[in-house]
Amino acid sequence: MASSSGVGTDTFGTGTLFYPPRLGGLFAKAGASFMITPHFGFGGELSWRPSRGSYDGLDYRPMFYDFNAIWHPIASNERRLVPELQAGLGGMNLRFYQTQQLCDNFAGCSSSSAFIESSNHFQVHFGAGLKVYVYKNLYIKPQADVHYVHNLFQFGTSWVPEVGGVIGFTFGGR
């Protein structure tokens, strides 16, 4: 979730102004972590928007990735509730596409989408969640994150909050 910059852009040089959207929507997330001790570990996450959004007359797809230090203030050994804090570094990638529809009398209409360019940004990530073990090593984790994305001029703020949930499994002892 990030606000729109509200600044119009003449993307195609036609005199028509397009206004950027706010960054939002449903994101998919994949990650893994490794606990070195019962309290400290490290991990990585990848978060991306499965569907493209509309941005200034183009399509776009955002992706966040980060590598984190992890702290469990309470050791997870045989506990059902385990708080988790994360802090790390990573990046954000915005990929832009142009979609065109072509029609003729012989083949009918078809559309094509071409990758145009991407914009990469450095980011700092903070997260907090609560692992709730529902069955043996299977857990759910409601989680809140905030990304500070350096020079995110495409949107109205560099602070990008994220809320979500995780379904996970702990291998080995917990």
Image: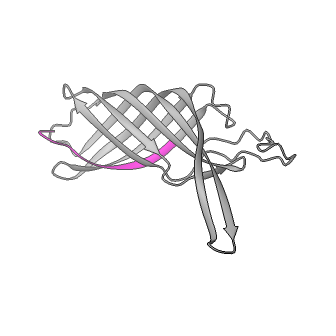
Q: The C terminus appears in which quarter of the rendering?
A: top left
- Colour setup of the view: one colour
Of the pair 108 and 149, the residue shown nearer to us: 108
Image check: 34 left or right of 112?
left
- Residue ranking furthest to the left: 173
Q: Nearer the viewer, residue 48 or 73?
A: 48
Q: In the drawing, does residue 70 fall left or right of residue 158?
A: left
Q: What percent of the width, then of the height, locates residue 43?
A: 31, 31
Return the residue nearer the eye: 78 or 87.
Answer: 87
Quadrant of image for the N terminus: top right
Tell me which segment is drawn in magenta: 162-174
Q: Residue furthest right?
A: 15
Which residue is painted at 45% across and 30% down in the image?
126
Whether residue 148 sits left or right of residue 170 in the image: it is right
The x, y position of residue 124, in whole percent, is 49, 26
Task: Say above or below: 6 vs 72.
Answer: below
Q: Quadrant of residue 160?
A: top right
**Residue 38, position as x, y percentages in the image:** 19, 29
* Image vertical order of residue 75 relative to residue 61, above or below: above
Q: Residue at x 39, y 50 (%)?
A: 165
Q: Total of numbered circles in the picture?
A: 0
**Prevailing secondary structure class for the magenta stretch in the rendered image:** strand
Q: Which residue is depicted at the point 12% across and 39% down?
A: 173
Q: Position of residue 73 (x, y in %)?
A: 29, 29
